[in-house]
Image (cartoon, rainbow, N blue to C red):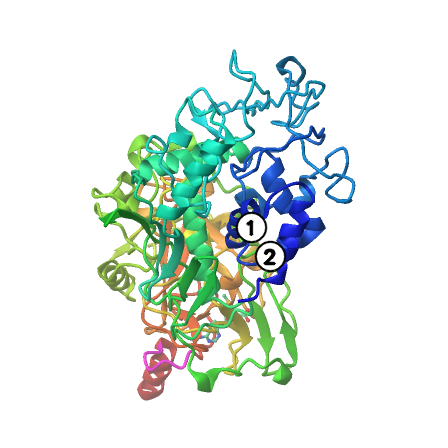
């Protein structure tokens, strides 16, 4: 077979630096694996990446060099080779030898051994770590990087071991920390876990000469079948990262040890001090993999049909199975270790935190929201405030943009007493000792106290069926779960002289989510509402004269979080004043936060709160009322504060909702009650259970 001309060219380019072809090939292979066979990165700037692989002192395949070559440049970050290259622009790390042979290869004929004098290279700003500081001496001298494992600024100083005069440029070690820790020694892709002690090149007295290393690696190449990384996901929403290393001298490490090593490496290389960083990185990979596979950029839902593709390149093959994401699972990490015939398989199974599980949109409905038919269309009513765009479309009449300001979170108006004081959250109200995902622990965390020791959510974020059923039962109109205040803040605000019987407030079940004072991570399964909107929604002009409404553009399962009701937090007195000023407005937008008014005696005015979304609000302000059989339910959610004067009002689906169905909510208003903050309107919900229709029928028959 004819040699690959690109390989030939790369070898030629390296030959100019005195690097033999047989030395170039394995390094090239590694780089190709690393860059997904993308030659452009390797060929860029006259093979700078490839040259760097030899000259930054990290490549153990580098041949002995015979003539000194000064090298100057910026201190290079000690990044694991390859990983940083794939993340950062190479331009950030100039390969800048004095002779500029990166740019003008003809100038530099040979590369010379570096010679260092340790007293001249301790200033990281004045010398490239691991690069030449003093090259007067003809004696080949190599160096080592001094790496500190402390969580501080990296130390670039170079310290040869006392008594050492000759080191080769690779394989050096300092204080037991091998440079091999920072990069793979053989053909293995970067992520392969190479054990330390079994490999003589990693031993502490490893200042071997290049011939020894050559032999060692030649032996390794003989015995090692190619190693590889596999990334796959299942229809269950799991993503699996497999690192498969077919080396007889691999010793499988515990996942904890691997994460720790990775954290140390990331810490040194990227100065990241978050100790759970590596776990997050792995989860992020999985999450990106899933979200890329499940949500198209246009927001279209994805056909759950599985696809798979195999990319072959330099013994690294990936099989990518795009998940249909129907069953999203909690973030959970399992690690399994398999041994067979001397090969080791290290597998991490991540079950990643989802958004709402998405179902396929029925084909007949696609295209319903064509912009072409619309008299008005807004691409994103949230103005980028939410993590996904929410369009607004009017295909019914000529009404344009509704006049309000989009806010993604509640804001306090004047008098409302809402203080998010962490000190007010006692240890009983949070799970300070938890780590990662509370839902993956055997014993439910303290935050489940509110929900009887059980999480309200299932892994993946849907509400548990029985919790949802209980909430629905409690919310049923005219249910026995009504609390009557002795001194109703609503009546007080209405008119201080009025006293009378309170109309009753529905007692509701609360969800309590983990928050800042909890030890768990942001990806914890008990944090759903606080992560915000994930469903594909649209504000649209309803055909039935209700004004604007909210609909879903994708099928949604039962128990899915849709959005919270966001507005200005006002006291009832403030709302009463506002209502008086705005009397006669067609639509009104306040909701009471009265779910727990019964738990305390008499509420002060600044504690009796409501949300007014008239001028400031989110998409929930467009949700219309439907009597009896609305497809959403509102559930109070405690996040920041354990007292229930202030809470979040979150909407969840009560049943499966089909794409393009309007999302509705039972306002719970008595159409005869003039005191309710949402002023009675002529209901056109269209439900068979419509209370106003019944009322009208009753009044017709009695007259
Ligand atoms: C919270 S807003 C809902 C969004 C509103 N449709 C709009 O255009 O902005 C509540 C108002 O919507 C109207 N509305 C909600 N549900 C309705 C229904 N079932 N029938 C008639 N009007 C309704 C009423 O005017 C009510 O005051």
Residue drawn at the location 28% of the way across and 64% of the way down = 472
Instruction: Kindly state the secondary structure of the residue where label 1 is placed.
Output: helix
Instruction: Please tell me whether residue 638 is drawn above or below residue 6 in the rendered image.
Output: above
Cα–Cα span, label 1 and label 2: 8 Å
Find disc 2 in the rendering and name its residue: 7
Relative to the observer, which residue lies in front, 256 or 192? 192
Single out the mark in the foreground, 1 or 2: 2
From the image, give the main secondary structure of the stretch colored magenta. Answer: loop
Q: Earlier in the sequence, mark 1 or mark 2?
A: 2
Tell me the number on the disc at residue 28. Answer: 1
Image-quadrant location for residue 155: top right
Q: Which residues are magenta?
A: 685-690
Query: Which image quadrant is residue 694 in?
Result: bottom left
* Residue 487 counted in the magenta span: no
Task: Mark yes or no: residue 516 visible.
Answer: no
Q: Is residue 141 left or right of residue 335?
A: right
Quadrant assignment, res 134: top right
| Residue 223 on image: x %, y % | 35, 46
Whether residue 268 is visible here, answered yes or no, is yes
Q: Position of residue 698 (x, y in %)?
A: 32, 83
Tag 2's secondary structure? Answer: helix
Q: Position of residue 468 (x, y in %)?
A: 27, 61
């Amino acid at each position: 077979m004819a040699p690959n001309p690109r390989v030939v060219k790369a070898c030629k380019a390296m030959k100019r630096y005195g690097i033999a072809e047989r030395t170039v090939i394995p390094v090239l292979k590694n780089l190709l694996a690393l860059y997904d066979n993308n030659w452009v990165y390797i060929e860029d700037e006259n093979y700078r990446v490839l040259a760097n692989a030899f000259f930054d002192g990290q490549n153990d395949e580098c041949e002995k060099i015979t003539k000194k070559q000064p090298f100057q440049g910026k201190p290079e970050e000690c990044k694991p080779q390859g990983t940083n290259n794939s993340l950062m622009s190479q331009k950030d790390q100039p390969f800048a030898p004095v002779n500029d042979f990166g740019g003008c290869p003809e100038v530099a004929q040979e590369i010379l051994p570096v010679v260092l004098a340790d007293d001249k290279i301790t200033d990281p700003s004045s010398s490239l770590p691991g690069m030449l500081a003093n090259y007067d001496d003809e004696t080949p001298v190599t160096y080592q990087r001094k790496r500190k494992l402390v969580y501080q600024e990296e130390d670039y100083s170079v310290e040869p071991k006392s008594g050492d005069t000759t080191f080769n440029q690779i394989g050096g070690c300092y204080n037991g920390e091998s440079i091999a820790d920072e990069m793979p020694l053989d053909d293995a892709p970067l992520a392969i876990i190479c054990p330390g002690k079994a490999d003589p090149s990693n031993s502490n007295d490893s200042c071997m000469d290049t011939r020894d290393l050559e032999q060692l690696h030649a032996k390794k190449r003989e015995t090692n079948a190619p190693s590889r990384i596999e990334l796959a996901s299942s229809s269950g929403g799991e993503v699996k990262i497999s690192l498969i290393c077919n080396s007889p001298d691999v010793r499988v490490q515990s996942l904890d040890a691997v994460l720790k090593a990775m954290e140390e490496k990331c810490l040194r290389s990227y100065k990241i001090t978050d100790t759970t960083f590596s776990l997050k990185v792995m989860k992020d990979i999985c999450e990106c993999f899933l979200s890329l596979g499940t949500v198209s950029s246009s927001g279209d839902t994805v056909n759950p049909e599985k696809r798979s593709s195999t990319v072959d390149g330099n013994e690294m093959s990936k099989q990518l199975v795009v998940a249909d994401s129907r069953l999203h699972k909690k973030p959970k990490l399992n690690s399994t270790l398999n041994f067979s015939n001397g090969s080791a398989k290290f597998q991490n199974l991540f079950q990643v935190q989802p958004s709402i599980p998405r179902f396929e949109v029925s084909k007949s409905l696609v295209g319903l929201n064509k912009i072409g038919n619309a008299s008005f269309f807004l691409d994103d009513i949230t103005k980028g405030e939410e993590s996904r765009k929410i369009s607004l479309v009017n295909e019914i009449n000529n009404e344009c943009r509704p006049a309000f300001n989009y806010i993604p979170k509640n804001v306090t108006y004047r008098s409302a007493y809402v203080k998010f004081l962490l000190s007010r959250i006692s240890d009983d109200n949070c799970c300070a000792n938890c780590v990662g995902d509370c839902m993956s622990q055997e014993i439910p965390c303290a935050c489940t106290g509110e929900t009887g020791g059980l999480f309200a959510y299932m892994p993946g974020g849907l509400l548990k069926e029985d919790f949802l059923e209980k909430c629905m039962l409690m919310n049923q109109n005219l249910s026995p779960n009504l609390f009557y205040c002795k001194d109703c803040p609503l009546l007080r605000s209405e008119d201080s002289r009025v006293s009378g019987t309170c109309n009753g407030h529905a007692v509701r079940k609360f969800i309590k989510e983990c928050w800042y004072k909890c030890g768990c991570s942001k990806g914890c399964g008990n944090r759903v509402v606080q992560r915000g909107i994930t469903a594909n929604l649209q504000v649209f002009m309803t055909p039935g004269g209700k004004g604007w409404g909210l609909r879903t553009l994708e099928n949604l399962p039962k128990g899915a979080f849709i959005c919270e009701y966001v507005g200005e937090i006002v006291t009832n007195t403030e709302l009463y004043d506002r209502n008086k000023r705005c009397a006669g407005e067609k639509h009104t937008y306040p909701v009471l936060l009265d779910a727990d008014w019964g738990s305390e005696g008499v509420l002060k005015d600044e504690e009796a709160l409501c949300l007014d979304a008239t001028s400031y609000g989110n998409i929930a302000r467009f949700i219309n009322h439907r009597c009896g059989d609305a497809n959403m339910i509102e559930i109070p959610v405690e996040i920041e504060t354990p007292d229930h004067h202030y809470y979040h009002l979150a909407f969840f689906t009560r049943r499966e909702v089909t794409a393009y169905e309007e999302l509705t909510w039972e306002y719970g208003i008595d159409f005869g009650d003039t005191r309710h903050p949402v002023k009675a309107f002529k209901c056109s919900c269209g439900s068979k259970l419509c209370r106003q229709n019944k009322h009208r029928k009753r009044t017709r028959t009695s007259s």
